[in-house]
Amino acid sequence: MFTYQPKIKMAVRSGHAQASIIDVSGELNGAAEEQLMAAYNQASSGGMKNIILNMTKLEYMNSSGIGLLVTLLVRSQRQQQRLIAYGLSEHYRQIFELTRLDQAIALCEDEATALAVAANAG
């Protein structure tokens, strides 16, 4: 019997006193839910107000992956946190615009910009 193994890896690291960074590598789809939510919980510890998603190593994202980001957005809003993403390819940037996720998740070009946005988020 074949069991699907998700091709996703999440790592959480500190950006600075006001932000945690989740490094997303691989495929963001329905199979990534457990890992993404665990990474979010770890990143949120200590009352962190900004969660930054590093998408530079994102290889694939489908509609289930978009759904997971919406779930993450709802959770972060309940915690009065801001979601920031950087490193999206042009293709995924367009998807964020089409789904209007770009209106709820701040999109940045690189990590330095994302950290600056988090520092100035007030």
Image: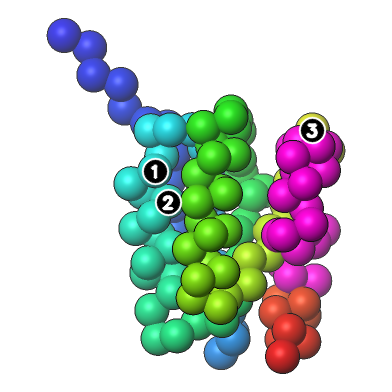
Crowding at dot 1, Cα within 10 Å, few <14 / some 14-19 / many 20+, comes out as many
Is residue 43 magenta-colored? no
Mark 3: amino acid: His
Give residue 108's position: percent from left, percent from top: 80, 61
Q: Quadrant of the C terminus?
A: bottom right
Q: Residue at x 41, y 39 (%)?
A: 32
* Residue at (61% x, 44% y) in the render: 57
Q: Is residue 49 above or below residue 24?
A: below
The colour scheme applied to this rendered structure is rainbow
In the picture of the structure, the residue carrying the numbered disc 3 is: 91
Q: Is residue 75 left or right of residue 95?
A: left
In front of the other: 75 or 60: 75
Q: Which label's residue is closer to the chain start, 3 or 1?
A: 1
In the depicted structure, whether residue 57 falls above or below residue 62: below
Place residue 116 in its image quadrant: bottom right
Q: Mark 1 touching mark 2, by CB under 8 A?
A: yes
Residue 103, given in percent of the width and then of the height, sits at 79, 57
Q: Please give the residue where the numbered disc 1 appears in the rendered image.
A: 33
Give the residue type at disc 2.
Answer: Leu
Name the residue tied to disc 2: 36
Give the residue displayed 67% in from the left and 48% down from the top: 56
Report whether 22 appears left or right of 94: left
Give above or below for 17 relative to 67. Answer: below
User: Does residue 6 appear to the left or right of 108 in the view shown?
Assistant: left
Label 2: element kind: helix
**Residue 54 visible in rendering:** yes
Examine the rendering and report whether any part of residue 14 can be seen.
Answer: no
Q: Residues at badges 3 and 1 in contact (C-beta under 8 Å)? A: no
**Cα distance, mark 3 to mark 2?**
21 Å
Q: Which residues are magenta?
A: 92-114
Q: Main secondary structure of the magenta part?
A: helix
